[in-house]
Amino acid sequence: MARFDIAKEYTSDLEGGFWNDPSAGYTYAGITFKYYPDWEGWTRLIQLGKQFFGAIEKIPRYTKFNDTILDEDVNNYYQQRQWKFLSKGDSIINQTIANMIYDFIVHKENAAIRVINKAVKTKDSTVITNGSQLSHQVVLLLNQYPQDLYKAIRAARINYYKKGPFSTKVKKAFIKRVQRFPVEI
């Protein structure tokens, strides 16, 4: 089975640091306060912001804290929500396809699930999907046809970024993120 620690290493350098996003508010390591206000790491981040900068609002953009407690909170969030719940990573056999799916879900959670489901339906139009997480049937097909579905998901992800409402500069950065992954497995 695929391993979370490997998938996390592939993605963690792209989802790090603090940012006070104008549209979503505080974001740390890709976790946004607007969408996840109950994340246990906010308490520690506020403490660190006060300790080192006087207030959370004064934390410079892209600041990463070297803090065991905060790192554990980030790790727990990603392992429980993105890996186990949304992507069913513990049930995917092929590590490369698990890495791609995990990275996509971390980056564009709801859109990623829709795009992945649609790509999987190209292999089996009768598969039962779930709009909020990958279904067990989707995971079974990922395990049965890893090469075909990896290529389909990778291509669909690039297409999503190309056609999405992103600036040209952002589209290029998003596509570059996908190009870090192998073309095929």
Image (cartoon, rainbow, N blue to C red):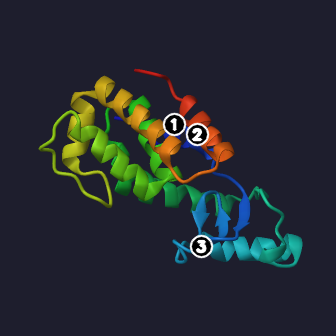
58 relative position to 148: left or right: right
Q: Residue at coordinates 58% horizontally, 39% vertically from top-left? A: 9
Q: Position of residue 143 (x, y in %)?
A: 26, 32
Q: Check contact, mark 1 vs mark 2: CB within 8 A.
A: yes
Q: Residue at coordinates 12% horizontally, 44% vertically from top-left? A: 126
Write down the residue under mark 1. Answer: 6
Q: Quadrant of residue 72?
A: bottom right
Q: Position of residue 21 (x, y in %)?
A: 69, 67
- Answer whether residue 2 is visible to the viewer in this image: no
Label 2 crowd (10 A; few <14 / some 14-19 / many >=20): few
Write down the residue under mark 3. Answer: 33
Type of amino acid at the residue the image marks with label 2:
Glu
Q: Position of residue 100 (x, y in %)?
A: 45, 37
Q: Check contact, mark 3 vs mark 1: CB within 8 A.
A: no
Relative to residue 150, is residue 27 depicted above or below?
A: below
Type of amino acid at the residue the image marks with label 1:
Ile
Type of amino acid at the residue the image marks with label 3:
Phe
Q: Which one is earlier in the sequence, the residue at label 3 or at label 2?
A: 2
Quadrant of the drawing holding the N terminus: top left
